[in-house]
Amino acid sequence: SLFRSPLPLFLVGRTGEALSRGEDAEICLRLALQGGELRYEPSLHVSHLLRPERLNWDYVLAARHWYGRAEVVLRIYHDGLDRNIPLSYPARLSQLEKKLEGLPPPAGSGRALTDSGLRLALKRNYLLGQRQGLLEMGEEAFAAMRRSVMAAFPSAFPAA
């Protein structure tokens, strides 16, 4: 079995119109926390066909927002790989608010932005996605998920 844990996955792939994502990353991070290896294979080539409606700036910004939402969960696994205790809900929310406050205001529309403006718009949507995902999850559910992940992979997290 890939997982030696009864812990269900917290993330799901795209469903319907929602651009939810992250289940593949969650699976890989769990494998790594169990001591498995993730490898890059340069000879592997993958073709991924995209519908034309997904090849525009609005879709890219929306996808970046949903990547941010997935990061609410994935950050806990990353903390385990880095041997850190994951931040609590209030600390995570405060950290996100500070990052958002530190961003310069957006200037212009998506098609008129400079390269740095485009990167800033992507970063803003990513952070906004994290904040929205965290707020929608709520403190109690976040704390329960954080405890569950830390209990499922105890050797990955330092003692609190």
Image: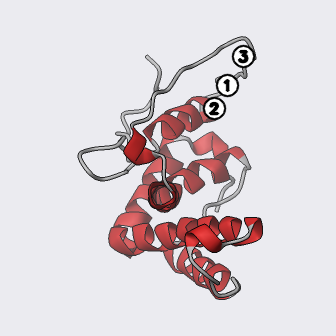
Q: Eyeballing the image, is 116 above or below 41? A: below
Residue 8 percent across, percent down from the top left: 34, 39
Q: Residue at x 48, y 74 (%)?
A: 131
Quarter assignment of residue 84: bottom right
Between the C-alphas of marks 1 and 2, the distance is 7 Å
Q: Residue at x 44, y 34 (%)?
A: 50
- Residue for badge 3: 41
Q: Amino acid at mark 1?
A: Leu
Residue 118 percent across, percent down from the top left: 66, 66
Between the C-alphas of marks 3 and 1, the distance is 10 Å
Mark 1 or mark 2, which is nearer to you?
1
Q: Amino acid at mark 3?
A: Glu
- Residue for badge 1: 38
Q: Eyeballing the image, is 69 above or below 93? A: above
* Residue 104 - label: none
Q: Residue at x 65, y 60 (%)?
A: 85
* Residue 32 - label: 2
Does residue 87 appear anywhere in the picture?
no
Residue 49 percent across, percent down from the top left: 45, 28
